[in-house]
Image (cartoon, helix red, strand yellow):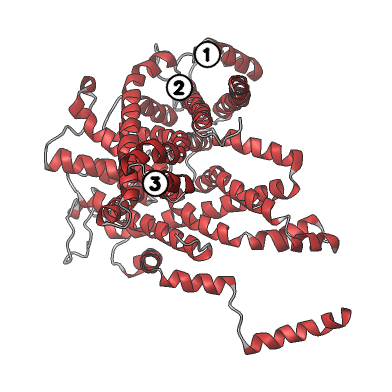
Amino acid sequence: MFGIRKYDNKMVNKGASIVKGRSLWIDARRRLFQNKAAVTALFLLIVISLLSIFGPFFLQHNFSDTDWGSIYQSPNLQTGHYLGTDGNGRDLLVRILYGGRLSLSIGLIATLVSVFIGVIYGTIAGYFGGKLDIFMMRVVEILYAMPYLIFVIILMVVFGRNIYFLFLAIGAVEWLTMARIVRGQTISLKEKEFIETSKALGQSDLLIIIKHIIPNLAGPIVVYITLMVPSVIILESFLSFLGLGVQEPLTSWGVLISEGSREMEAAWWLLIFPGLFMVITLASLNFIGDGLRDAIDPKEY
Amino acid sequence: MRTNMIKFIVKRLLIAIPTLLVIIAFGFIMMRVAPGGPFTSERALPPEIERNIQEAYNLNKPIWEQFYIYIKNLSVGDFGPSFKYKDFTVNELILSGLPVSVTLGLSSIIISLFIGCFLGIVAAIKRNTYFDYSVMSISLIGICIPSFVMAPLLSLFFGLYLGLLPTSGWNGGNVLNLILPITALSLPQIAVISRMMRASTIEVLNSNFIRTARSKGLSPSYIVRKHVIRASILPIIEYLAPASAGLMTGSIIVEQIFGLPGIGRYFVVGALQRDYTLVSGVMILYASLLIALILVTDILRALLDPRVKL
C-alpha cells in the first residue's frame, strides 16, 4: 500500500501530460462562452469599464471644467460635447465616464468588503457549529429584520458624507446573505471525507478552513459577487440620489441621475444618458451572474 | 395543532422583541454619538439659552437616563418632540405623513401581487411561447431599471411629453396624482414577483401530486385553481417581507421625486438636517412594521404549507 503511494505522484503527472483532465472550471468556462446572452453582457461590461477607465484621457473636456458659454447644450458631434452639457456647461460624456469609474469601483470594493466579512463569518459559524453557530445566526437574523437601507442612511448621516465611509457602510450591510450562503455550504462540506482526512492528519481548524473549505466555496462566491455588484451600485446611486452619497465636484451615476431628474424639463439628455449607462451595466452584470450560475452549477431545466 | 400554533407565535414574538430593542438602542446611540447636533449653528448661542435648550430636550442628563426616558415614552407610543420642526412632535409629523405612505405602499403591494402572480402563472402554463418570452424579458428590464431612474422617466414621458398626468403633488389623494407614483413603485415588484411565480409554478406543475391530479382526469383550470396556486404561492409569501422593505425604501425615492408629503420625505429631511428624534422615530416605525410583517408571513407560511413544522 505504501509502495503504491510512492509511485502515485509520478503516475498522475504522466497521465496529465497525455490526456489533459478537464477541471470543473474549464468546463464552466466552456458552458459560459456558449451562453450568448452572457457573452454579449460580458462584452458590454468590458466596453463600459474600459471607456470609464481610459475614455476621459481621450476627450477634450475635463469633468469639472465649467463653460458658461455653452450651458444646456443638446448632444452635438461638432462641438465635442457628444452627449451635451449640463447647467454649468460641463461635458456630460466625461462626467458619465468619471461617474462610471466611481460607481463601478464602489460596486467592486464594497462587494469585496462584504464578501470578506461574509465568508469569514459564515465559515466560522458553519464549521464550528453548536451554540456559536446558533448565536451567530441569531445576530444575522436580527440584522436581517432591519430595513438595511435606512441603516446605511443613518450611518452616512452620523459619520458624514465621506466616500471611503460609503464603501464601508455598504459593505457592512451587504454581507448578511453571503454569510448565510457560506454557512450552509460549509455545513455540508465539513462532513465530507477529505475534511475528515485533514482532521485525522492533525491539521489545525484554521488551516482546514483556509485550504479546504474556502476554495471549495469559490463557485457560489463568484456567482454571488456578480449578482451583488449591481445591487451595491444601485445602493450607492440611491444614496447619492438623496444627496447622502458622493459629493460634488466628484460624481457618480447616482449623482448624475439625480441632477438629470431635477433638470429634465430643460435637458432630457441629462437624465437619459446616465440612466442608460447605468441600466446597461446593471443588466450586463445580471446576465453574467445568471450565466455563471448556470455554468458552474449546471442543473438541467 | 392550536396549542402548537400559539407556542410558535409566542416563540416568534420572543425573538421579535429583542430585535426591536436592539434597533431602538442602535438608533438612539447612533444619533447621540453623531458629531454635530441639531442645534450646532454658525452663530454661537449664549450659554443660558444653550442650557435651556438642553434641559428642554433632556440632553443634559446622563445618556443612560436619556435612553430610559426614550424607551419609557416609546412604550406609550410617544416619539418625542421633533428637534428641527419646532412646535411639532414626531408623532404629529408621522401621522401627517402616514396616510400618504400607507396609500402608496398598500396599493402598490396589492397591485404588484395581483399582476405579478397572474403574469407568472400564465407565463408558466404557456411556457416557451411568445407570451412567456415577452413577459420574462420585460420583467428582466424592469428589474434592471432602479426606481430612481424609472420614476423620473415616467414623469418625463407621461407628465411632460404627453401631459396626461400631473407630475407632482398629493392634491388630497386625487387618483390621477397617484397613478405615476404607484406605477413607479410597483413595476420592479411586479417584475420580481412574476419571475418568482413563474419559476415556482413550473416546479409545482412538474411535481407528482399534479400528475396525480391530471391522471384523475381533473380539468386543467381546476388543477391550477385548487392545487397549483396554493403550492406555488409559498415563495411569494416568503417574499412579502423583503418586498415591503423594498417598497419602504422605494417610497423614499418616489415621494421625493413626485413631491408627496409622506413619511419617506420626512425621513430624508430629518437625515439631512440631523433631526435625531424624527429619524429614529421613522426608523423604529419602519423596523417594527418589517418585524410584524416577517411574523405574519411566518405564520401564513405555517398555515399554508403542511410541511412546515411548528
Disc 2 with disc 1 on a shared chain: yes
In three-dimensional space, the C-alpha distance between marks 2 and 1, rounded to whole angstroms, equals 13 Å
Sequence-earlier tag: 2 or 1: 1
The kind of secondary structure element at disc 1 is: loop
Residue type highlighted by circle 3: Arg
Q: Is residue A139 above or below residue B95?
A: below
Sequence-earlier tag: 3 or 1: 1
User: Which label was assigned to residue B57?
Assistant: 1
Disc 3 with disc 2 on a shared chain: yes
Could you tell me if residue B196 is visible in this image? no
The residue at the point 34 percent across, 44 percent down is B121
Quarter location, residue B220: top left
Q: Say left or right for A186 vs A204.
A: left
The residue at the point 35 percent across, 49 percent down is B124
Q: Is residue A288 above or below residue A34?
A: above
Give the camera-side residue of A145 and B114. B114
In three-dimensional space, the C-alpha distance between marks 3 and 1, rounded to whole angstroms, equals 69 Å
* Letter of the chain that mark 3 sits on in the rendering: B
In three-dimensional space, the C-alpha distance between marks 3 and 2, rounded to whole angstroms, equals 57 Å
Q: Say left or right for A40 vs A109.
A: left
Horizontal and vertical percent for residue A106? Answer: 47, 53
Quarter location, residue A200: bottom right
Horizontal and vertical percent for residue A114? Answer: 57, 50
**Residue for badge 3:** B214
Horizontal and vertical percent for residue A53? Answer: 41, 65
Quarter location, residue A77: bottom left
Q: Residue furthest front?
A: B216
**Residue for badge 2:** B278
The kind of secondary structure element at disc 3 is: helix
Residue type highlighted by circle 1: Tyr
Q: Is residue A45 above or below residue B252?
A: below
